[in-house]
Image: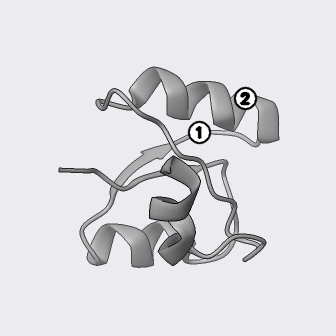
Amino acid sequence: RYEILVIDDHSPDRTAELAAAAGARVVRHPVNRGSGSSRRTGIREARGEIIVMLDADGTYEPRTIPEMLA
């Protein structure tokens, strides 16, 4: 089991809207608070025992998560 949690750091793009429409849980910051704050919010809000963080910049593909966990 897993959840997909998206932290919207008051971004002007439609990422949060699209993520919510795809079934992700979205937590929104009312103002831009920066990357570190977004990561802290994600950790605090996550419901799972294992947390995997990916930026939307595509550095890591979600399909690599099983390899990361191994």
Residue 69 position, x and y percent, is 50, 49
- Which of discs 2 and 1 lies nearer the camera? The answer is 2
Circles 2 and 1: CB atoms closer than 8 Å: yes
Q: Residue furthest front?
A: 70
The label on residue 37 is: 2
- Residue flagged by tag 1: what amino acid is it? His
Residue 65 position, x and y percent, is 50, 62
Q: Which one is earlier in the sequence, the residue at label 2 or at label 1? A: 1
Q: Residue furthest left?
A: 1
Residue 24 position, x and y percent, is 32, 61
Q: Residue at x 63, y 57 (%)?
A: 54
User: With respect to residue 23, does 51 lie above or below?
Assistant: above
Q: Residues within 10 Å of mark 2 (few under 14, many from 20)?
A: some
Helix, strand or loop for disc 1: loop
Snapshot colouring: one colour
- Residue flagged by tag 2: what amino acid is it? Ser
Q: Nearer the viewer, residue 60 or 25?
A: 60
Q: Residue at x 42, y 78 (%)?
A: 18
Q: Is residue 45 left or right of residue 16?
A: left
Taking the image as drawn, is residue 34 in sight? no
Taking the image as drawn, is residue 19 in sight? yes
Q: Residue at x 49, y 76 (%)?
A: 63
User: With respect to residue 63, does 44 lie above or below?
Assistant: above
The label on residue 29 is: 1
Helix, strand or loop for disc 2: helix
